[in-house]
Image (cartoon, helix red, strand yellow):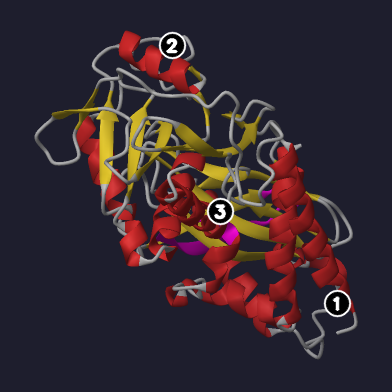
Amino acid sequence: MSTRPFRRLVVALAVASVVLAACGSDDGDAADDLAGYVREPTPTVDGLVFVDHADGDPTEADLVAEPDGLLLAYFGYLSCPDVCPLTMGDIGDAIELLPAEDAARVETAFVTVDPARDTGEAIAGYLGVFLDRYRALLAPDDAALASAAEQLNVVYRIPEHEPGEYYEVDHSAVVYVIDDDGRVVREFPFGTTSEDMSTAIASVLRSDEAGV
Amino acid sequence: MRHRLLLPALAVPALLLAACGDSDDDAAAPAADTDPCEVLTLTGTRVNLPPAQNTAAYMTIENTGDRGVTLTSAATDLGTTIELHESSMDDDGVMSMAEVPGGIDIPAGDSVDLEPGGLHVMVMGVTRDVEVGDDVELTLTFDNGCVTDVVGPIEAVTSGMADMDHDHSAHGEDGDHDHSEHEHDDGEHEHMDEETGNMEMEESDS
């Protein structure tokens, strides 16, 4: 019993240090207390072309949000059993925590960094577990994927392997929040909770309305 | 061959006994052959809904003994190859995953969380279609001679803390282990699990 207040304190301190770490981890611009960080200069996606398999029929897509909306973009791969599903699940929870009118403005994009093994159909099937509105994206070729990664500062490394041999892919585990101009207005590192993501997304939606 | 099959079968009733037999009246005192699983408590077992051919299983392992114990291997018929893995992130936010050499150590009197973004049981080559709520059985082998089965549900796992609090009524599942947990804690412990879960996430990053 007597240890409880102490535990609370420990947790409060842990949370506080996480918040501090989040604010201090990158450029000073993130003077707000929202989760994640804003990179300077703000990256902008431009001229990217993907194939979206969300609706069965492949259609062309990019990484720009719909008008007045936000796109949460993540680069991962389906053989990733641990951090990718967690992140998709947390994004799903974060969107669910938003008021309905906000949630309707938020879409998610999963870009596979492992196009040799991941099919569009499999990506779409998986995203459908967590999300209502999503883009299940395959780059049309390696160069297109590389240029998307370059614009967003995504790192991915496919190890050398024999045909058919199992391999794991190192990759940036970051959620990029992209607005309707293609600007990356915020980034959430791995481990950002759904609650914190949700709060930050709601705030970004407001600031966008204010025309910032 | 037969012996192998027999071991887990024996381990389960032994664990049940351990769970129920908290009282020391049944003079099992002769230290001759105490159950090595007695010092280990498994809670919160769950398995990620497989995104494709791989998935991951998580749990908390508590070692109440006075010696360190190592989880050396895991098995389940959900996959063709089962390994103990750890995800780790570098300073640039790049995540990678590797097998844990030598297994996962659970220090004496301590507990270790297998959790998203850190240590996990890696299940490769998923063998069958599963849905959220389906139960999966895992057999865990420790270096102190304990071989034990644990059952956990398939979940669309989200970050640990939120996870514990909602919509997992189907999550009491692994009956025997649950009992054993309730025995030597008293509700207070659940708080601690949550909280240490919180902090150990940071530890496992380093």
Residue B185: x, y in percent?
75, 79
Query: A74 or A71: nearer the eye?
Result: A71
| Numbered circles on residues, count | 3
| Element on which disc 1 rests | helix
First-in-chain label (2 vs 1): 1
Q: Quadrant of residue A78?
A: top left
Q: Residue furthest left?
A: A57
Residue B97: x, y in percent?
57, 31
> On the image, numbered disc 1 is attached to which residue?
A5
Q: Quadrant of residue A108?
A: top left
Q: Which is closer to the viewer, label 2 or label 1? A: 1
Left or right: residue A159 compared with residue B160 = left
Left or right: residue B38 compared with residue A36 = right
Checking the image for residue A161, the label placed there is 2
> On the image, numbered disc 3 is attached to which residue?
B58
Residue A120: x, y in percent?
22, 32
| Residue at image location 82% in from the left, 85% down from the top | B27
Q: How far apart are marks 2 and 1 (CA)?
A: 53 Å
Which kind of residue does numbered mark 2 sit on?
His
User: Mark 1 belongs to which subunit?
Assistant: A
Which quadrant of the rendered structure holds the C terminus of chain B? top right
Query: A174 or B1: nearer the eye?
Result: A174
On the question of residue B10 being in view, the answer is: no
Task: Say whether residue B143 is magenta.
Answer: yes
Looking at the image, is A106 positioned above or below residue A165? below
| Residue at image location 76% in from the left, 47% down from the top | A20
